[in-house]
Image (cartoon, rainbow, N blue to C red):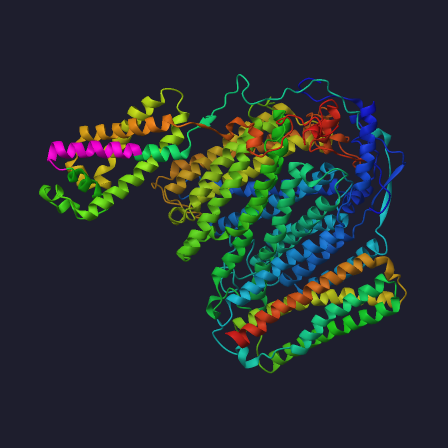
């Protein structure tokens, strides 16, 4: 577009009588036809291709003269009949939605426990659980090593071949395997606790201390035969559940005791998504004067 | 009302400051991108089939490096820049000379390709149907050469019309785009040369 | 202007149409370089091809309705599914992409025509003539240089079946050349779209203020530009093989049939994104307007569509899990294919979030959009299932795959296109489409579509392979196939409603006025249909919703952007 353009609001009228537009031409059609014939020549007869070549050449020359030295154009008169209707101004104002308004609840907790509390809570719960398990060992088998050796059956093959007498004795490798495995799982579960506890609407200690350990015990009960057959054969379920409850109560207590921190949830939805959509932000009054 | 005036003044200023890229520039850049995609597929096919021919003749038996033709084509990329500079300074005499040099260099390249094909076909009996080497060689070099022919046609048209007094200064923008196209296919030749000549002859 | 449920009437919509003689008006259409006329011709020819390919699909379903049926023979069946697929992808999907972008982009960015108006006309004609060449194979295929009729090698034309030794006659050549020509049309149109969006925007229309439609179609054009040349390259190689005896795909001479698959799918997978993008673009305009809310998360939408535009170039080999690639390739392409699900999911969430809390106007365009969201979700999920290589080994080339991609292309693309046609028909013709017929169209088509393709998932699970022309009874496929075939009836009835609606409404529909939907983008700021020059004065915009700014001078968008 080489000619002078004047811009205005959408739908505004122009002072000029006509508008310059590219002029109509059929050379693009002819050249397309020529190229088609050229290719059709491959599958039909070479003569078709020759005709196509001639047509293409003629059309290329025609197109060339369309654009060189200057592009062909026509003047289209402005038709007053074709003026858009004036845009109707709407007086209604739009109410902006803000976070925290009644009727729009924030679904994800605004405050959470730090992940570090999950770490320490998990470790504390793990100690509590281990203590209960060892107590069980002392009471039932007169050895604190018995439950530890059983736990090591998760990773060490062949533990199942040992006699009860062997299981009662301290063994170096199973001890460390059990220690590391128990520690890692305790920390992971602790962190999961820290993340999900604030999502429960009420009675977090109840969920954490009682129900979650019961769910976990149920899950273990259905899968233990696969993951640790050694333990599955010798497990004492009441003691197991008590040990889980010990983990839940101690870990949950540690986590709940920590100071909670604010999340991005307290930001507006738009700020959090780094989204800039009209109406989601407070208008910056100073910005546009 | 005061606000309306502010908006109207704002519109004028926006209009004045409004700058957009030239449509020809964008058009040529994206044309080159789409051509690159086309060439990439042929180059990939060539690379996959290096050394996979079941029967001869093999590249090492028949292929010679077209060093002179390559130098000609690549230097034509420089001469067309000189021609463009001359045109920008409105120095038509220099423009015609450099343009003619570009054309001659390009024509020599096309002649060298033709001579090479003639030798391969009639002396070495390598055609596109002989083996995979023939297939990939003729299709990739041929694809490049056909683009050079298109570029050459435009170069010749510019030259001939200018000789007959067409005011080429008015078409400086279009000449620039033609030279971009020419540069691109000069430098595609570097890739074709590497894939077709250097890799089979020197590496594999 | 409270909530608008009916179009505003105003007298100017009944513009005087000057009388032209037949040859004059023919010249006006044939020689035109006007983007609106070309866009219309694109969409109309695509609709014609849609009906043709739809009839082919109906015959296919008739054949498969009963076990050991004999409506058509195996040869005809091969031709039918080949021509159905090729037509739908290259002669319906691609011109729809081109038609919608060519018609709407100049209007939406406030300019008078495309950057290269003559190239625009060339793109249309070469697409149309390419399509004609493809269909000429029905009469020309058995002509001068061999026997055989329409192409019968599948829309993907796998080598070495397409080689001269196995595919004699000229039918395969017609496929390669016809599609090559229409591919050239698509490439030049994409080039034009990119140049137009970069170089022709009206003052103030920065990239960040561009309508979402234009953004999506810009990325779509980018994909066409880099994905179509590999197909052209493959077709050139195929023609070299067939006519000059080259050995690209000739396994006897050491060539590789797998190379064809790679080249084809390097094109083919981006192609499905090319086809679905117009639907994305249309939804991004229709859903906000019919929810009376701005599009949720615009920057995220732009980011997502750009991400798809690049990731989709690196996923092609998930179509080829069954050819025995290395497990590293399998892992790479499975992972990259799943990765595309992330930006696509972002888009689904953003459209849903746009509707959430909005004041929904349950009119036909929005109905099609809602059906799109649900059906495209199913398509996306089955797509992720198929991206898992072992799952794909199980169901490769089964009707599960057929159901999956028909859910993307019909449940997604076609529903999106219908939404777009109901939305922009008033702008194009100046008349409203009838709402009652539109609802009939929607419900018939939606029910019929799900009857056919939801059921075909189960045929796939039960082991029914693709492309078989008949099957024995008692394999558990009988009832499913019958239901799927019966689904054709409501779909065809829906299409008839649509065609009748278009004809009736163009003749005596309610005048639409300039802005029947109370929308916010620039195309609604001019008359319906727009004058040849689009705008008397090119507009100046200050936000992504210029019409909103003009309608609400007290509360314009640019205060917030």
Could you say which quadrant of the image residue C500 lies in?
top right
Main SS of the magenta part reads helix
Check if residue A134 falls in the magenta segment: yes
* Residue C486 lies in the magenta stretch: no
Q: Would you place residue C166 above or below residue C445 in this image?
A: below
Q: Residue furthest bottom?
A: B123
| Residue C87 in view, yes or no | yes
- Residue A177 occupies which quadrant of the picture? top left
Residue C356, relative to residue C45: is it above or below?
above
Left or right: B162 with respect to C285?
Answer: right
User: How many numbered badges does the structure rendering display?
Assistant: 0
Locate the C terminus of chain C by quadrant: top right
Q: Is residue A276 left or right of residue A71?
A: left
Q: Picture coordinates of residue C243 (x, y %)? A: 59, 66
Residue C95 visible at all = no
Give the residue drawn at x 82%, y 30%.
B8
Residue range highlighted in magenta: A124-143
Q: Quadrant of the N terminus of chain C?
A: top right
Up-down relation of residue B121 to residue C180 (above or below): below
Q: In terms of depth relative to the viewer, which is nearer, A127 or B87? A: A127
Q: Position of residue C318 (x, y in %)?
A: 46, 50
Q: Is residue A156 left or right of residue C87?
A: left
Front one among C426 and C390: C390
The picture places residue C551, in percent across and down from the top left corner, at 74, 24
Q: Position of residue A124 (x, y in %)?
A: 30, 33
- Work out whether residue A128 or residue C516 is closer to the camera in this orientation and state it: A128
């Amino acid at each position: 577009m080489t000619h002078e353009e004047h811009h205005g609001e959408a739908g505004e009228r122009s002072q000029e009588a006509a508008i310059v537009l590219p002029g109509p031409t059929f050379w693009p059609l002819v050249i397309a036809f020529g190229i088609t014939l050229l290719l059709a020549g491959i599958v039909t007869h070479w003569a078709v291709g020759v005709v196509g070549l001639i047509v293409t050449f003629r059309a290329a020359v025609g197109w060339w003269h369309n654009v060189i030295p200057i592009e062909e154009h026509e003047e289209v008169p402005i038709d007053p009949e074709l003026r858009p209707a004036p845009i109707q101004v709407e007086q209604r104002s739009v109410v902006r939605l803000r976070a925290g308004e009644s009727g729009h609840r924030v679904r994800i907790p605004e405050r959470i426990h730090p992940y570090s509390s999950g770490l320490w809570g998990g470790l504390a719960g793990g100690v509590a659980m281990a203590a209960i398990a060892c107590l069980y060992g002392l009471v039932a088998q007169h050895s604190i090593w018995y439950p530890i050796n059983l736990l090591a059956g998760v990773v060490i093959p062949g533990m199942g071949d040992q006699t009860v007498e062997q299981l009662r004795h301290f063994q170096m490798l199973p001890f460390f395997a059990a220690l590391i495995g128990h520690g890692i799982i305790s920390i992971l579960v602790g962190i999961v606790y820290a993340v999900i506890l604030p999502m429960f609407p009420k009675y977090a200690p109840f969920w954490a201390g009682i129900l979650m350990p019961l769910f976990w015990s149920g899950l273990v009960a259905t899968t233990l035969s696969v993951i640790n057959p050694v333990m599955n054969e010798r497990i004492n379920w009441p003691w197991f559940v008590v040990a889980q409850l010990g983990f839940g109560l101690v870990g949950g207590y540690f986590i709940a005791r920590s100071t909670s921190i604010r999340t991005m949830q307290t930001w507006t939805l738009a700020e959090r998504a780094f989204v800039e959509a009209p109406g989601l932000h407070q208008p910056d009054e100073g910005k546009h004067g | 009302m005061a606000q309306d005036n502010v908006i109207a003044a704002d519109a004028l200023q926006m209009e004045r400051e409004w700058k957009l890229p030239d449509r020809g520039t964008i058009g040529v850049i994206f044309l080159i991108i789409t051509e690159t995609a086309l060439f990439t597929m042929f180059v990939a096919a060539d690379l996959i089939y290096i050394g996979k021919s079941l029967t001869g003749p093999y590249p090492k038996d028949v292929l010679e490096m077209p060093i002179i033709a390559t130098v000609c084509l690549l230097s034509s990329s420089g001469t067309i820049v000189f021609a463009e500079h001359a045109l920008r300074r409105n120095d038509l005499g220099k423009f015609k000379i450099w343009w003619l040099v570009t054309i001659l260099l390009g024509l020599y390249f096309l002649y060298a390709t033709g001579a090479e094909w003639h030798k391969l076909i009639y002396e070495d009996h390598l055609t596109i149907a002989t083996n995979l080497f023939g297939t990939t060689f003729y299709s990739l070099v041929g694809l490049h050469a056909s683009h050079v022919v298109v570029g050459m046609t435009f170069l010749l048209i510019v030259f001939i019309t200018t000789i007959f007094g067409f005011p080429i200064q008015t078409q400086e923008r279009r000449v620039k785009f033609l030279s971009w196209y020419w540069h691109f296919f000069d430098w595609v030749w570097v890739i074709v040369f590497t894939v077709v000549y250097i890799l089979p002859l020197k590496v594999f | 202007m409270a909530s608008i449920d009916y179009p505003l009437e105003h007298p100017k919509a009944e513009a005087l149409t000057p009388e032209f003689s037949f040859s004059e008006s023919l010249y006006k259409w044939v020689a035109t370089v006007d983007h609106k006329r070309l866009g219309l011709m694109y969409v109309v020819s695509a609709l014609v091809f849609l009906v043709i390919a739809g009839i082919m699909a109906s015959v296919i379903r008739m054949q498969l309705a009963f076990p050991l049926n004999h409506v058509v023979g195996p040869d005809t069946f091969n031709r039918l599914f080949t021509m159905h697929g090729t037509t739908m992808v290259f002669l319906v999907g691609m011109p729809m992409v081109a038609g919608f972008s060519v018609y709407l982009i100049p209007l939406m960015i406030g300019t008078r025509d495309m950057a290269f108006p003559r190239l625009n006309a060339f793109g249309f004609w070469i697409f149309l003539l390419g399509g004609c060449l493809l269909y000429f194979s029905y009469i020309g295929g058995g002509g001068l240089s061999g026997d055989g009729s329409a192409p019968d090698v599948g829309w993907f034309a796998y080598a070495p079946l397409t080689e001269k030794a196995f595919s004699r006659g000229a039918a395969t050549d017609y496929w390669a050349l016809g599609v090559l020509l229409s591919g050239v049309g698509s490439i030049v149109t994409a080039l034009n779209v990119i140049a137009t969006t970069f170089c022709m925007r009206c003052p103030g229309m920065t990239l960040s203020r561009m309508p979402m439609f234009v953004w999506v179609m810009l990325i779509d054009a980018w994909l066409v530009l880099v994905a179509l040349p590999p197909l052209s390259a493959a077709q050139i190689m195929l023609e070299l093989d067939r006519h000059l005896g080259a050995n690209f795909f000739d396994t006897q001479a050491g060539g590789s049939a797998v190379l064809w698959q790679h080249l084809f799918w390097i094109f083919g997978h981006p192609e499905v994104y090319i086809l679905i993008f117009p639907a994305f673009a249309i939804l991004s305009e229709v859903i906000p307007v019919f929810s009376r809310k701005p599009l949720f998360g615009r920057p995220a939408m732009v980011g997502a569509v750009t991400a798809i535009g690049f990731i989709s170039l690196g996923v092609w080999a998930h179509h080829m899990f069954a050819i025995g690639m290395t497990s590293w390739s399998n892992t790479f392409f499975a992972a990259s294919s799943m990765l595309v699900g992330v930006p696509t999911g972002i888009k689904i969430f953003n459209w849903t979030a746009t509707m959430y809390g909005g004041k929904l106007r349950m009119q036909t365009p929005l109905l099609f959009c809602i059906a799109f969201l649900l059906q495209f979700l199913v398509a996306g999920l089955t797509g992720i299932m198929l991206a898992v290589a072992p799952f794909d080994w199980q169901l490769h080339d089964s009707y599960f795959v057929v159901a999956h991609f028909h859910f993307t292309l019909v449940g997604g693309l076609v529903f999106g296109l219908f939404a777009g046609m109901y939305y922009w028909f008033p702008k194009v013709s100046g008349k409203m489409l009838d709402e009652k017929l539109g609802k009939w169209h929607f419900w018939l088509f939606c029910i019929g579509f799900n009857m056919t393709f939801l059921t075909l998932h189960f045929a796939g699970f039960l082991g029914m392979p693709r492309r078989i022309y008949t099957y024995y009874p008692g394999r558990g496929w009988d009832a499913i196939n019958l239901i799927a075939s019966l689904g054709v009836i409501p779909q065809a009835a829906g299409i008839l409603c649509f065609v009748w609606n278009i004809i009736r409404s163009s003749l005596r529909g309610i005048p639409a006025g300039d802005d029947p939907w109370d929308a916010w983008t620039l195309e609604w700021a001019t008359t319906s249909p727009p004058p040849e020059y689009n705008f008397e004065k090119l507009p100046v915009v200050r936000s992504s919703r210029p019409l909103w700014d003009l309608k609400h001078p007290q509360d314009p968008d640019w205060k917030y952007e």
